[in-house]
Amino acid sequence: MSTTTNPGAIDAVDAGATSLLRFATAGSVDDGKSTLVGRLLHDSKSVLADQLEAVERASLGRGQEAPDLALLTDGLRAEREQGITIDVAYRYFATPRRRFILADTPGHVQYTRNMVTGASTAELAVVLVDARNGVVEQTRRHAAVAALLRVPHVVLAVNKMDLVDYAEPVFAAIAEEFTTYAASLGVPEITAIPISALAGDNVVTPSAHMDWYGGPTVLEHLETVPVVADPSDDPARFPVQYVIRPQTAEHPDYRGYAGQIASGVLRVGDAVTVLPSGRTSTIEAIDALGQAVDTAWAPQSVTLRLTDDLDISRGDLIAPTATAPAVSQDIEATICHVADRPLKVGDRVLLKHTTRTVKAIVKDIPSRLTLDDLSQHPAPGELVANDIGRVVVRTAQPLPLDAYADSRRTGSFLLIDPADGTTLTAGMAGHAFAQAAAEATRADGSDDEGWDF
């Protein structure tokens, strides 16, 4: 049996050269987000020649002497205005130091839910601010969403510094206001960078107009921000996607459980628990890319084989016995409602958690968050599109959820309309209520087509 490389022994230089950073951009309308994205792609030489020629022709047609780099992204926005629904535009580019997936999110207030989509998997969020306007309501809203989604790194890009004469006091005041606000929300790391996306100042190359600024450019920060974490720091979670039983003459007794490790490290010999059943076993073997290995870690896709012949199917979760999550049918969570259809108390929904989908009922909506001042509006009765609030959901079957603060993968879920499959809500689990307490306090109800649990 071969032994894989220890995940904690990754060389820092090699990791930085080959690592992938997922980041999202956000900003109010006319803060220059499209220009920033265009400048970033153009100056990092990530734009194909024919794309640049098309932008130059379109810019000349508008009477502009220089290419309008915002046109590199404006095409998708024009499509949306024509009635084509595009939630988030993704851009893929690379530099010699790192690969990037950029989620370009809309800036309108009514598309706040789209930032949730873009930032849900992001390790960094770039929040733009117009230097002339400073921190506005939408800036605070974007900071709140980044905090709720536990985005580890936030960059404040103070744009259009050329329109305020590159004044350091203007930048310093905006940076202090935003940093104070974001820190109060629990954002762990905030980096403020003064830029002019139109002129290219501090986007890819340092600015000659702001010698008072000694920090990194936007691209330099994106290339160097740490994203390679030691997977052994997190408890291991393995949602089962598929049960493999070839039942061939060569492998008559083979039974493996395939899936992607959501977090942590799994090793041969680990004592594990299968949830929600609670049955225990030991990892007998790990197969990765057709090879037997001793160790595997997130986000590798592997097949586990256990020493015991257990009843395991898609949707089950395999976790180390010592750190297995609690299992409950009652879930309290923070959610962002993304559908046009309101979410109301009593709604019957489907809840999708990792690879498992179960029936559920919305038992309560205790509050709705007012993002302007972070106050809680109690008992709103319903949540509409872009609302963020607290909900209590009861599921037909017990689920092993972690708190979202502990695991973004296994602490998140979706609520889905059972009638047409539309995604209604993105949820972030707070904590699962104790089952006994939930049973004692929940309202009794008669069976209604299998939806009263």
Image (spheres, helix red, strand yellow):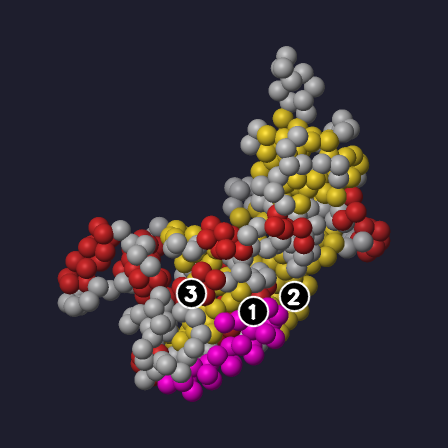
Q: Position of residue 236 (x, y in %)?
A: 69, 46
Q: Is residue 290 left or right of residue 379?
A: left
Instruction: State whether residue 361 appears in this view.
Output: no
* Left or right, 193 with reference to 354: left
Closer to the observer: label 3 or label 2? 3
Q: Which residue position is annotated with label 1? A: 189
Instruction: Please identify, in this view, whether the residue under mark 2 or under mark 1 is nearer the observer.
Output: 1
Q: Amino acid at mark 2?
A: Ser
> Label 2 near label 3: C-beta < 8 Å?
no
- Which residue does the image show at 65% across and 54% down from the upper left? 407
The structure residue drawn at horizontal position 59% and vertical position 62%, both measured from the top left corner, is 150
Residue that mark 3 sits on: 220
| Amino acid carrying mark 1 in the image | Glu
214 is higher (above) or lower (below) than 419: below
Residue 164's image quarter? Answer: bottom left
Q: Position of residue 301 (x, y in %)?
A: 58, 38
Helix, strand or loop for disc 2? strand
Reading the chain from its start, which is encountered first: label 2 or label 1?
1
- SS type, badge 3: helix
Marks 3 and 2, how far apart at CA? 41 Å
Q: Amino acid at mark 3?
A: Glu
Q: Is residue 109 above or below residue 252?
A: below
Of the 4 image quadrants, the one containing the N terminus is top right
Quarter of the rendering occupied by the C terminus: top right
Q: Mark 3 or mark 1: name the one nearer the start of the chain.
A: 1
The image quarter containing residue 306 is top right
Residue, disc 2: 367
What is the span of residues highlighted in magenta in the rendered image? Answer: 167-191
